[in-house]
Image (spheres, rainbow, N blue to C red):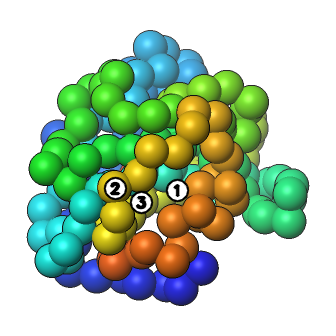
Amino acid sequence: MPFALSSLRVTSSAFDNDGAIPARHSQEAEDLSPALAWDGLPEDTRSVAVICHDPDAPLVQKGCYGFVHWVLYNLPASLSSLEEASEQGTRGTNDAGNLGYNGPMPPEGHGVHRYYFWVLALDTETTLPEGLGMNELLSEVEPHLLGMNRLVGTYQRDA
């Protein structure tokens, strides 16, 4: 996939960039997806997708490293935010094998992990079926990627 970092800006009311993700968004608590907002979508954006990936997870699977916590797509370009525990969009399959959001839960004693909340701007409206994994989604949207950017949160499991 081409790396198309753009002027798109991603924020959350739950945590700052490089800041700690509150426990309520983890598997140690309510496991609610955090609120996200974005602005500066490239011109001609027709839809948006969201992926949350933990590159610090000590896993290599399906040819990729880390752990995918959230895959969400078929979001209209008119949308500029997701509320906490949002039901918008089409849920993909995370690496736990579930549909939708699966919050942080690093292995015990593994220290701080980084969680990349990517927002992808696409030049076409998508009507992809529910259940795509990250690699499947990226394969489908790569030809339509106009730009992307991310918000990074951190999380460390309580001892």
When asked about the image quadrant of residue 74, the answer is top left
Q: Amino acid at mark 1?
A: Arg
Q: Regarding mark 1 in the picture, which secondary structure is present there?
A: strand
* 52 in relation to 90, above or below: below
Q: Regarding mark 2 in the picture, which secondary structure is present there?
A: loop
Circle nearer the N terminus (3, 2): 3
Q: Nearer the viewer, mark 3 or mark 2?
A: 2
Q: Amino acid at mark 3?
A: Trp
Near-viewer residue (137 or 110): 137
* 14 in relation to 43, above or below: above
The residue identified by callout 3 is 118
The residue identified by callout 2 is 125
Q: Is residue 78 left or right of residue 90?
A: left
Q: Nearer the viewer, mark 2 or mark 1?
A: 2
When asked about the image quadrant of residue 14, the answer is top left
* 159 in relation to 133, above or below: above
Q: Amino acid at mark 2?
A: Glu
The residue identified by callout 1 is 114
Q: Nearer the viewer, mark 1 or mark 3?
A: 3
Q: Is residue 87 left or right of residue 106?
A: left
Q: Is residue 115 left or right of residue 75?
A: right
Query: Percent position (x, y) of residue 130?
Result: 57, 33
Query: Percent position (x, y) of residue 97?
Result: 74, 30
Task: Report how far apart the C-alphas of labels 3 and 2 lie in the structure.
Answer: 18 Å
Query: Percent position (x, y) of residue 96?
Result: 73, 32
Image quadrant where one finds the N terminus: bottom right
Q: Which numbered circle lies on residue 38?
A: none
Q: Is residue 9 left or right of residue 32?
A: left
Is residue 6 something that shows in the picture?
yes
Mark 3, residues whose alpha carbon is within 10 Å: few (<14), some, or many (≥20)? some
Query: Percent position (x, y) of residue 51?
Result: 49, 52
